[in-house]
Image (cartoon, rainbow, N blue to C red):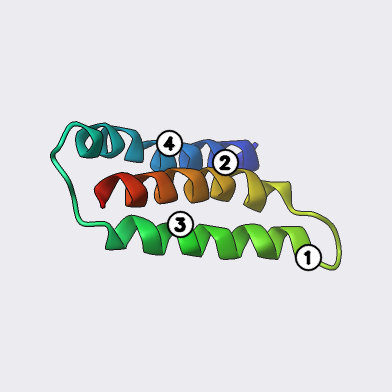
Amino acid sequence: EIMPSLVGSEMCIREAYIPQIMANIGGAKSQPLQPLVAAVSCLLWVIYGLTNEHKIDYILIIPNAAGVIFGFLTFITAL
């Protein structure tokens, strides 16, 4: 089915921040703007998925919630 594969691919994209977080913690700081913008974008999609008038859209919420977490962690560790 196509939806689980989309959720899986989105989760892999968000997990790509893990090496950057580790590098930031190790002292090789990166620029913080891109992960902050990505986290805010994901947060807006989570809010949309929660406030959809027809039903809660878990296909939007789950991968974008991971984007919020990893994006903000990358932003914070890059400071």
39 versus 20 height, above or below? below
Task: Look at label 2 and name its amino acid.
Answer: Val
Q: Residue at x 80, y 54 (%)?
A: 56
Q: Which residue matches tag 3?
A: 39
Comparing labels 1 and 3, the label whose residue is closer to the camera: 3
Gap in Å between the C-alphas at discs 4 and 2?
9 Å
Q: Residue at x 26, y 52 (%)?
A: 79
Gap in Å between the C-alphas at discs 1 and 4?
25 Å
Assign a secondary structure to mark 4.
Answer: helix
Task: Look at label 1 and name its amino acid.
Answer: Asn
Mark toward the start of the polypeptide (4 vs 3):
4
Q: Which residue matches tag 2?
A: 7
Mark toward the start of the polypeptide (1 vs 2):
2
Q: Which residue matches tag 4?
A: 12
Task: Tell whether 35 sits left or right of 10.
Answer: left
Q: Which mark is residue 52?
A: 1
Task: Look at label 4 and name its amino acid.
Answer: Cys
